[in-house]
Amino acid sequence: MISKILPPLCLLSAALHAAPLFIGTGSKDKGIYLADFDSATGKLTEPMLAAEYQNPGFLALHPTLPILYAVGQPASPFPNGTSSVAAFAIGSDHSLKLLGEASTGGKGACHLAVDAKGGTVAIANYGDGHISTVRLNEKGIPGETVTVIANKGSGPNKGRQEGPHAHGVYFDRANTHLFVPDLGLDQIFVYPFDAAGSKLGEALPSLVTAPGAGPRHMAFSPDEKFAYVIDEMGATVTSASYDSASGKFTLLGTTPTLPADFTGANKTAEIEVHPNGKFLYASNRGHDTIAVYQRNPETGALTFLQHAPCGGKTPRHFKIDPSGKWLLCAHQDSNDISVLSLDPKTGLLGKPENTVPSPSPICLLFAR
């Protein structure tokens, strides 16, 4: 349920290095939370509720307007049972005020991205696998669903891959392509994108992972010449080179995220390239670590460096802070967020510090 605006959150505004952090949470919790992170000390304040919204899993920012978007469940169910995408105005104190919501065109929305021109929000609907685009008006409020793509097929894991399960959406820097990892079909789909009309074109050749790998999320190198996909079920990182002119991927190989002697249950979750382009990070849910790799900027190859304990249970999401010196890790099942120091020269992570309680955190997003 979406409620009226909540009282503003008092942040550490006087702190020189303060960075507000929005937190998306799970279905059992009240909505979007807000905390304050100090990059000089690595201290994170305990999150406080910023806006009520049911199941606000993933969050995104408008490129120019002070607006935050979240996918979740509508205040009043849509007739077709689809999920919702909601827009919130961000106040000067980073409080949130609901502006409006619209259907995502699919069920079980789990990820979203806003294009570079701020006219489109793309959405991955895990439940029915639909990939959609929703038009944003000049005020950034979501309205018409423009494109809905319903892929077909299945994968070898009948328990998880009985049909398509779109799990992420990513625009390229040129704003001409949309990439969609699909856990159910073992593919990363590539669609031409028309920003003027918020439309997706016919699919280009996909990046195909190993059967049963279950691609979940992806990250690009800073020069966008290489892409890395975290495979949820395969516990691997799939690497590929990327040609931005054609939208074509060339598979390079896979790298494990787990130690060779680990035999427990595990599902990977998030992946991120360090802003300096030298290192890559991937989270293990089960082993409960962050796998760290050195990245060759010329070849895209990964070299394993470290399995760093994440400080909690089930690291569903993490985010490197704007300074590049800290990694904040959100633990869905232990209901907390840990701060790990990060050495930008070596890429190595320190021990978990300053762990603060946070209800079922599943997305971390720094405000601008």
Image (spheres, rainbow, N blue to C red):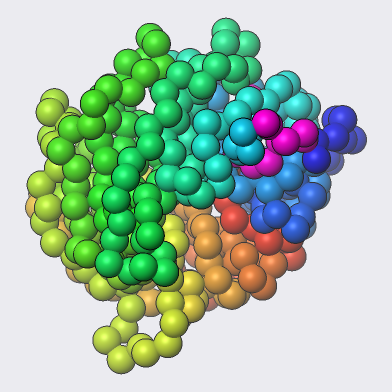
Q: Residue at x 60, y 66 (%)?
A: 331
Left or right of 292: which side holds 81?
A: right
Q: How many marks?
A: 0
- The location of residue 241, given as percent across then percent down, is 14, 46
State which quarter of the image contains the C terminus.
top right
- The location of residue 301, given as percent across then percent down, is 15, 59
Left or right of 20: which side holds 168?
A: left
Q: Residue at x 11, y 56 (%)?
A: 252
State which quarter of the image contains the N terminus.
top right
Q: For the magenta stretch, what is the residue range?
A: 67-79
Q: Residue at x 24, y 26 (%)?
A: 202
Q: Which quarter of the figure has residue 174?
A: top left
Residue 69 lies in the magenta-colored region: yes
Nearer to the camera, 163 or 291: 163
Would you say residue 89 is visible in this rendering?
no
Would you say residue 117 is visible in this rendering?
yes
Residue 138 lies in the magenta-colored region: no
Q: Which quarter of the figure has residue 68?
A: top right
Q: Which quarter of the figure has residue 12?
A: top right
Indicate whether 144 appears above or below 188: above
Q: Residue at x 39, y 11 (%)?
A: 197
Indicate whether 109 appears above or below 357: above
Left or right of 317: which side holds 49?
A: right
- The location of residue 173, given as percent across then percent down, is 31, 28
Nearer to the camera, 60 or 216: 216
Indicate whether 231 appears above or below 170: below
- The location of residue 286, given as percent across then percent down, is 48, 78
Nearer to the camera, 45 or 180: 180
Left or right of 345: which side holds 143?
A: right
